[in-house]
Image: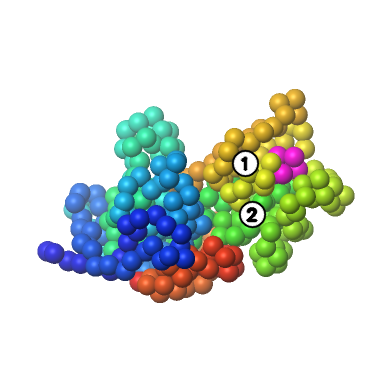
Amino acid sequence: MGNKMRAMVLSECAPIESKPLKLMQIDRHEIKNSDEILLKIEACGVCHSQLHGIEGDWQDIGIPPSLPTVPGHEVVGKVVEIGKDVTKFKIGDRAGITPLLSACKKCQYCKEGKEQHCESSEVTGESLKGGYAEFITVSEDFATKIPSTMSSEYAAPLFCAGITAYKAVKAAESNTHRKIGIFGIGGVGHMAVQFARIEGCEVIAVSRNQKHLQIAKKLGAKDTMVFEQDQGKFLEELKNRHGLLDAAIVFAPADIVTDTAIKATKKGGLIVIATVGKNPNFFAFEEKTIRGTLIGSTKEMEEVIKIADKEKLEVISESHPLENANNVLKMLKDSQIDARAVLVP
Ligand SMILES: [Zn+2]
Ligand SMILES: [Zn+2]
């Protein structure tokens, strides 16, 4: 009773330079329903979309829905307590949580296995239940088991970056679209390069950041291209080197990138947008398909863990203490993180 825990709390959205997260002692989450597990958090990835949420960039689309919050939505921890109806986990197991903390399990979306679209879903890290803390509770249905072969620091980034990358590559219909451009190589993009390679695709990685492009090359991209503000020049270079793309996947949240990705795709091709932006322009007579994606279901999360384990997916990450969350987010903002940072309480 009355247990407390350390957490990095966001009380007001503000630029990360002003250190909006404060280390606080807040009430420890306790199991409230019989299907819940209590996790002692061992690692939480620092996602770029979380940075936008903290800085208030996405308040007009309702993110975060309320304050205060404890950010952090790619969480791995050890099961330290279980509700009486829990069957999937036992004490001592490790489990991970995606940004989808819960859903109603009754609506059409939930019944079809698309629970990420549930209208009454809860998002991890947009209430006091987030990963920048020591403990969290979750229904066992929204937690995924971590195999003993994976460290918690390795596994955490799979729970947002990994599933986002996997789902986007799947959405790009890689079995018929063999030449795929990936726009934005960071935490998510470096995994998408690998998922596309596993599918046998030819990957062209595009980023503003030279270091990110080196990583993409190392992870199997056939070619890398620096993103050019001069769109005409970029498209000319792409055509000369490879011709137009069969499909493009956009992770960089910038409208100019999305616009370029659409123009870099051949007629009849497919563009997958896995980020937030304005409505893209496209010319209907070119018969292109534009498709959005958002994380994935619990079942797809299990697939990601299986593939990562089997294919020895490389997760490029660096660990930092929980208390340094503001600094780590600042480094992310300044493109000083190679791929993913992980906070360890
Ligand atoms: Zn994320
Ligand atoms: Zn639902």
Percent x, y of residue 168 = 58, 46
Q: For numbered disc 1, what is the local secondary structure? A: strand
> Three-letter amino acid code at disc 1?
Val
* Residue at mark 2: 184
For residue 264, what is the image quadrant?
top right
Q: Nearer the viewer, residue 314 or 261?
A: 261
Q: In this rendering, which labeled residue sits more in front, label 2 or label 1? A: 2
Which residue occupies 37% across, 64% down? Answer: 21
Where does the magenta region start and end?
260-265
Percent x, y of residue 332 = 53, 64
Instruction: Check the picture and name the quadrant holding the N terminus.
Output: bottom left
Q: Nearer the viewer, residue 260 or 214?
A: 260
The answer to the question of whether label 2 and label 1 lie on touching residues, with beta carbons closer than 8 A, is no
Q: Residue furthest top?
A: 285
For residue 79, what is the image quadrant?
bottom left
Q: Is residue 10 left or right of residue 231?
A: left
* Residue at mark 1: 272
